[in-house]
Amino acid sequence: MLSMTEASARHVPPRQPARSRRIVVIGGGFTGAALARRLALSEADLQITVFEPRARLGAGLAYDTRDPALRLNVAAARMRAFPEDPLAFERFLQRTGRLATDGPAEAGGAIYARRSDFGDFMHDALAPLIASGRIVHHREAVTGVARQGSGYRILGDKGTALSADLLVIATSHPLPCCPQAAMALADDPRVIANPFETDHLNRIGREDPVLVLGAGLTAVDLLASLRERGHVGLVTLLSRSGALPQPHADRQLTTTIAAPAQAASLREWLKTVRSAVERAEAEGLPWQSVFDALRQQSQAIWQGLPLSERKRFLRHLRRRFEARRYRMPPQIAALLDSDMAAGRVRSIAGRVTAAEATRDGLLLTLRQGSGTARIETPWLAIATGPDHCGIIAQHAYLRQMADQGLIRADGLGLGLACNGASRAIGADGAPVETLFIAGPLARATFGELSGVPEIAAQVDAIARTLLAEQPLHGADRAQPVLS
């Protein structure tokens, strides 16, 4: 069934029907929606179609929530979704009166809005383009993709079948993966396997202890959601390193980092960053200012490192870097500090080596240093981070594309292989000219590609490439089959 989101009151002149190129985007979260919007606002004669099962475009996994406890982990001023209008989100918050009904939003001299507000902002930006027909939203999951001439044939789970000249994979972050040693518990009803569906937390008793596998931003978001529901029981955060996300600085300041003459060594970059932190602190600046500056250079740094150094980073530095790079909003940082001081939250380091279900709870065996420990809990939540390594196995259409040699895993366990122009790398090692990888699944190539500004920049580059392409004639232009 063809489904469109609700129209906005703003008027957008409809595009006249034409036998134009069709661009299909798989995934309508922030990445896919931002690309569709960028293309739709151009003067190019295009048919733009987005496959997204959710009712609205632009929210995706991250922002499709009504949980008021979940907030953006960066200030609203830094949510630069549209490069041509970097303050659009801030104006939306003011125009719609969101801040007047969100007393806790302001902290540390900045606005840390609710995640749902950003989802609403994206919907507001996309709705008139959908209403005018410039973007067609198929509210379906893609079940199959087959090569058809120089284009593609795409199948949706509600019966839509259409052809495309150009295809963009903008699939969102995959769900976390239960550790292999705890797979025996995967189907147990006392396991919260999807941390983003926070309604499942309503099953947890007010004083029930909860063990969370993971200690990153998703884990502390779960803590905030539990407390929003009146939960007061002990929450244990278990991760291999025991490192927790760090807070933002009280002041929004940025320093500079002088790049070394030769950036081919991870060790050299680590020395540079440490030196920059020492210099910043000597000047009275917070260490966070160095990481904010580092973010602006991170893609260039990553792309300058050889493959062996990238692998070394992922093995040895990734978790500690991410704890400082992806920081908690002040509201959740204050909650975490308060709960840890009161003994309601603890963070422990360890690795799950075995797990079993008992009548009274879930029993996990941990490796901690050279010793072992056992921990029993009535509830277990999986917040280990997205399972990018298994992304192809998680989607039938990606498995089909891999079988056809159109895509392959990137080799670093971060997503899908692509080149610097975001074109997918096929099984033969060559770029596929009409197939693009957008968003976090392209991180192995670009490095920093999780934040909105970096994704927006990649989306803009992909759009420029697509708009510069000459019309293609190899794809069958059959109309959608609707059910």
Image (cartoon, helix red, strand yellow):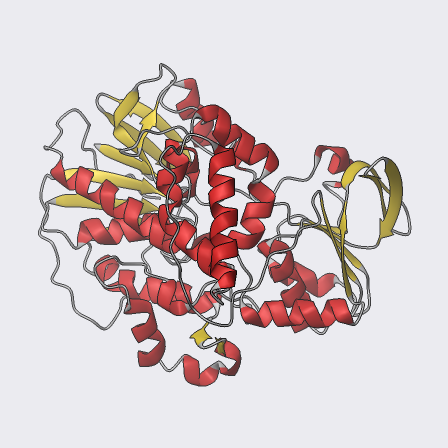
Q: Position of residue 441 (x, y in %)?
A: 43, 38
| Side (left or right) of 237 relative to 49 | right
- Residue 425 in view: yes
- Residue 326 in view: no
Give the residue at x 37% y 62%: 79
Give the residue at x 71% y 42%: 240
- Quadrant in the picture for residue 119: bottom left
- Quadrant in the picture for residue 425: top left
Q: Of all residues shown, which one is farthest toward the bottom?
A: 100
Q: Is residue 407 above or below residue 318?
A: above
| Figure quadrant of the C terminus | top left
| Tally of marks | 0
Q: Position of residue 23 (x, y in %)?
A: 23, 39
Q: Is residue 201 above or below residue 320?
A: below
Give the residue at x 19% y 28%: 476
| Side (left or right) of 64 relative to 338 | left
Q: Nearer the viewer, residue 235 or 329?
A: 329
Q: Position of residue 287 (x, y in %)?
A: 52, 59
Q: Nearer the viewer, residue 3 or 63?
A: 63
| Side (left or right) of 359 relative to 205 | right
Q: Nearer the viewer, residue 221 or 307?
A: 307
Give the residue at x 22% y 21%: 149
Q: Of all residues shown, which one is farthest toward the right?
A: 359
Q: Is residue 422 above or below residue 474?
A: below
Q: Position of residue 302 (x, y in %)?
A: 41, 36
